[in-house]
């Protein structure tokens, strides 16, 4: 379980780069069954530019209406991970990613690192804005990438 | 050491005993419980208005720390001047302004208006911020003092004139509240002092109460109204109350404000205390403000 998982995203276009980070993602992994869940407050993402943060909340994610983004799924090949042995294990996570009132099935590769009694997990994957009904107006269409790189980095503590 | 490891592992594993589809739901419920502990957090209201000005006057918004906001504003002539003046478009007064956020609750700004060749400067301090969660605050409260210097040539250069006669001051409190995603309202009690007034019996100190608000029409467009009521005993003869109606149109880093108003001036003294036009007589001016923000210093 972690209460300060790090989720960041990155949008790169010729016009500008946009990145934001949220260090307050809450997540749990059930090491027995491989079930995983994430929950994060959308307005907790911090941007370098204040106006970007405002637009992110007001215009794109509408965090007033849809305050949370969540993921629930399973690590399909949890059996690969040997919790008794330090090391990093490549796994596949599949489940439902929900944000902006849209839920999509996603399957992404992830890495689980076991070190002593701690466990960390990280993954990089892409999401399409269209898939989550996040529309970008014509005038700024060149400023925001249509696919966003998402990065998740969590250190779990046993509970 | 090994025993400890195994113990921790057992703890980790023993936390959940159910398997299958029910499991993720349980995890989610657990997360929800953890999230409710964020009730200890304070959530500040943001974006009460789209920009730091409602129409002519200040809104309760500040520019963020390290952000420069360049504002170019125009007011054209009166609509009732007819086709010959292309309904006022042949005439224009403008104000060029530069606002900067020193902290998230303190901004400073300077400007120059062609109207009466006026220089102005102000700062805006957020005293209270609307918030919910652990710390609850129903309103945002800001204090905006301004100083303006009218640099028009002396009407009578033969007499002794004092530079201080050109100065005027205003002190304004702004009490604002974002009622919902689309609706925000604010009250603006204002005190204005002019060092020199035209008539011997004209008051130097003026009081006005402003009321204004916005209603979003779409995510990026809102309709704004701003009205300043001058207290009867504290107004200059021949002046009217300032009424403005406009739209905010937001496109990325720009906010365009287009509006109709009866005030040609764009600093506190001129639009609150020196508005002579009447809406019912058609003394209405078309105008716009363009705001472009530049992030000078990144947040982190």
Image (cartoon, rainbow, N blue to C red):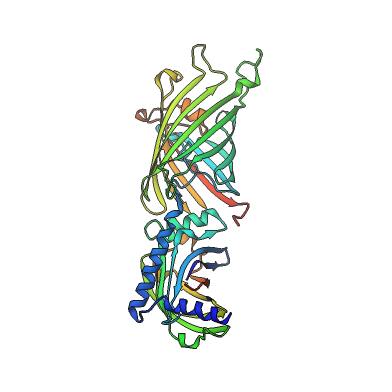
Residue B67 point in image, percent of width and height:
58, 49
Q: Nearer the viewer, residue B48 or A123?
A: A123
Relative to residue B96, is residue B86 drawn left or right? Answer: left
In the depicted structure, whether residue A81 falls above or below residue A22: below
Report the residue at 57% width, 37% height from top: B123
Report the residue at 58% width, 39% height from top: B109
Work out whether residue B221 can be spotted.
Answer: yes
Residue B33 point in image, percent of width and height:
39, 64
Report the residue at 59% width, 51% height from top: B294
Quadrant in the rendering for residue A47? bottom right
Which residue extends farthest left? B22
Q: Nearer the viewer, residue B161 or B36?
A: B36
Quadrant in the rendering for residue B219? bottom left
Q: Quadrant of the N terminus of chain B?
A: bottom right
Work out whether residue A143 can be spotted.
Answer: no
Residue B59 point in image, percent of width and height:
47, 40
Relative to residue B279, is residue A147 drawn left or right? Answer: right
Which residue extends farthest bottom? A80
Q: Nearer the viewer, residue B28 or B66?
A: B28
Report the residue at 48% width, 47% height from top: B256
Q: Quadrant of the C terminus of chain B?
A: bottom right
Residue B193 point in image, percent of width and height:
53, 23
């Amino acid at each position: 379980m972690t209460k300060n998982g790090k989720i960041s995203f990155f949008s790169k276009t010729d016009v500008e780069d946009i990145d934001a980070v949220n260090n307050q993602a809450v997540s749990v992994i059930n090491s027995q069954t491989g079930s995983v869940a994430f929950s994060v407050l959308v307005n907790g993402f911090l941007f370098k530019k204040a106006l970007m943060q405002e637009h992110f909340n007001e215009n794109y994610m509408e965090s007033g209406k849809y305050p949370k983004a969540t993921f629930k799924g399973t690590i399909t090949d949890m059996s690969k991970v040997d919790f008794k042995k330090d090391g990093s294990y490549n796994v596949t996570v599949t489940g439902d990613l929900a944000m902006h009132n849209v839920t999509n099935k996603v399957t992404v590769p992830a890495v689980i690192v076991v070190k002593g009694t701690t466990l960390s997990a990280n993954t990089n994957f892409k999401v399409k804005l269209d898939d989550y009904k996040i529309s970008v107006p014509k005038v700024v269409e060149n400023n925001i990438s249509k696919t966003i790189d998402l990065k998740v980095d969590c250190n779990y503590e046993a509970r | 050491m090994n025993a400890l490891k195994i113990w921790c592992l057992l703890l980790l594993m023993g936390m959940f005993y159910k398997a299958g589809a029910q499991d993720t739901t349980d995890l989610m419920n657990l997360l929800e419980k953890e999230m409710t502990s964020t009730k200890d957090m304070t959530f500040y209201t943001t974006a009460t208005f789209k920009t730091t000005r409602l129409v002519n006057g200040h809104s309760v918004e500040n520019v963020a720390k390290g952000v420069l906001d360049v504002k170019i504003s125009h007011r054209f002539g009166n609509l009732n001047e007819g086709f010959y003046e292309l309904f006022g478009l042949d005439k224009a007064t403008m104000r060029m302004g530069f606002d900067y956020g020193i902290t998230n609750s303190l901004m400073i700004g300077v400007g120059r208006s062609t109207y009466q060749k006026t220089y102005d400067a102000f700062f805006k301090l957020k005293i209270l911020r609307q918030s919910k969660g652990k710390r609850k605050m129903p309103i945002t409260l800001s204090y905006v003092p301004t100083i303006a210097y009218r640099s028009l040539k002396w009407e009578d250069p033969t007499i002794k004139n004092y530079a201080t006669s050109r100065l005027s001051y205003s002190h304004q409190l702004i009490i604002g509240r974002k009622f919902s995603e689309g609706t925000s309202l604010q009250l603006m009690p204002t005190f204005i002092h002019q060092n020199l007034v035209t008539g011997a019996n004209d008051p130097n100190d003026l009081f006005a109460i402003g009321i204004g608000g916005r209603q979003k029409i779409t995510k990026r467009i809102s309709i704004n109204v701003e009205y300043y009521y001058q207290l009867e005993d504290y107004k200059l003869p021949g002046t009217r109350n300032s009424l403005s109606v406009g739209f905010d149109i937001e496109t990325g880093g720009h906010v365009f404000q287009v509006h109709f108003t009866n005030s040609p001036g764009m600093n506190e003294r001129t639009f609150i205390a020196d508005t002579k036009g009447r809406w019912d007589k058609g003394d209405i001016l078309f105008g716009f403000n363009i705001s472009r923000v530049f992030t000078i210093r990144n947040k982190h």
